[in-house]
Image (spheres, grey):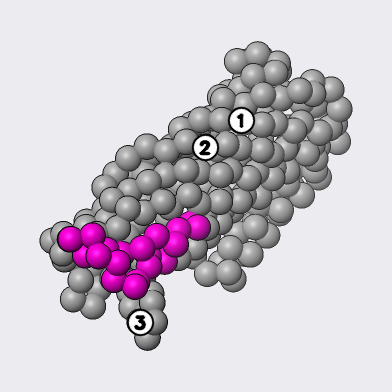
Amino acid sequence: MTARTALLSLAMLAGAAGAAHAQTAEPWSPPRAGDWIVTGRLTQVAPTTEDRILTAAGVDTGLQVDVSDHIMPTLGFTWFVTDHFAVEAILGTTQHEIRAQGPGTDVVVHETWVLPPVVTVQYRPLTEGGFSPYVGAGVNAMLFYSGDDQNGFTVDLEDGLGLVLQAGADVGLTGPWSLNVDVKKVWFNTDADINGGALTSDVDLDPWVVSVGVGRKF
């Protein structure tokens, strides 16, 4: 997704909130036990890896792995178990470019799509007013698919599970509508085998996942 497309999508979300405001003047109230919030977000996934590429014998090649950022639309589904505790599931998919970089070298070796479903348990301290901050923790899966090898390289990435910490807030707009901001830190490790294991890397992706969107309470 390009920056222009991301901005257009955000404008559409803002327009939906504006339409809701025109239809109702009811004040927003924090969700209670049994409520749902469905949130459409624009999300940036920014991996932070700087792991080394080694030969099969464990010799440092002088190259490191670089994984590109990606902006995508995501959906969040939050169910309130109690007034203070909620469970959220986040759905989306991202595409990333993997490069081998080093002195005199900057080459794409693989492009892949990733399905990273996330489930967190949130704690929300406030039950009154138009502001509902939260913190959360949970797990995510990294499922790599539709990989496309580049420039004569073959790359195999291992699926797995990671840990997630989360912080964010819902800011009431009007009626059932709210603005959501959300930040997650994911810790995830995968093994990358390059050219049939001739080269390897133990990759800590550890992305920051930053989102903004509009939610509707049900």
Considering depth in this image, is 24 or 67 the residue closer to the camera?
A: 67
Quickly name the residue at label 1.
136
Give x and y (percent) for residue 150.
25, 73
Disc 1 residue type (three-letter): Gly
Is residue 48 at all visible to an observer of this figure? yes
Q: Nearer the viewer, residue 162 or 209?
A: 162
Q: Which residue is mark 3?
A: 105
Q: Earlier in the sequence, mark 1 or mark 3?
A: 3
User: Tag 1: Cα neighbours inside 10 Å, few (<14), some, or many (≥20)?
Assistant: many
Secondary structure type for disc 1: strand
Give the answer, above or below, for where 55 lies relative to 203.
below
Left or right, 109 with reference to 87: left
Q: CA distance from mark 3 to mark 2?
A: 33 Å
Residue type, label 3: Thr
Query: Nearest the camera: 90 or 22?
Result: 90
Quick check: marks 2 and 1 in contact, CB under 8 Å?
Answer: yes
Place residue 192 in its image quadrant: bottom left
Towards the viewer: 10 or 22: 10
Q: Which residue does the numbered mark 2 point to in the structure image?
A: 164
Q: Is residue 11 magenta?
A: no
**Which numbered disc covers residue 32?**
none
Q: In the shown orientation, is residue 216 left or right of residue 71?
A: right
Q: Amino acid at mark 2?
A: Val
Other residues around mark 3 within 10 Å, as few (<14) / some (14–19) / many (≥20): few
Q: CA distance from mark 1 to mark 3?
A: 40 Å
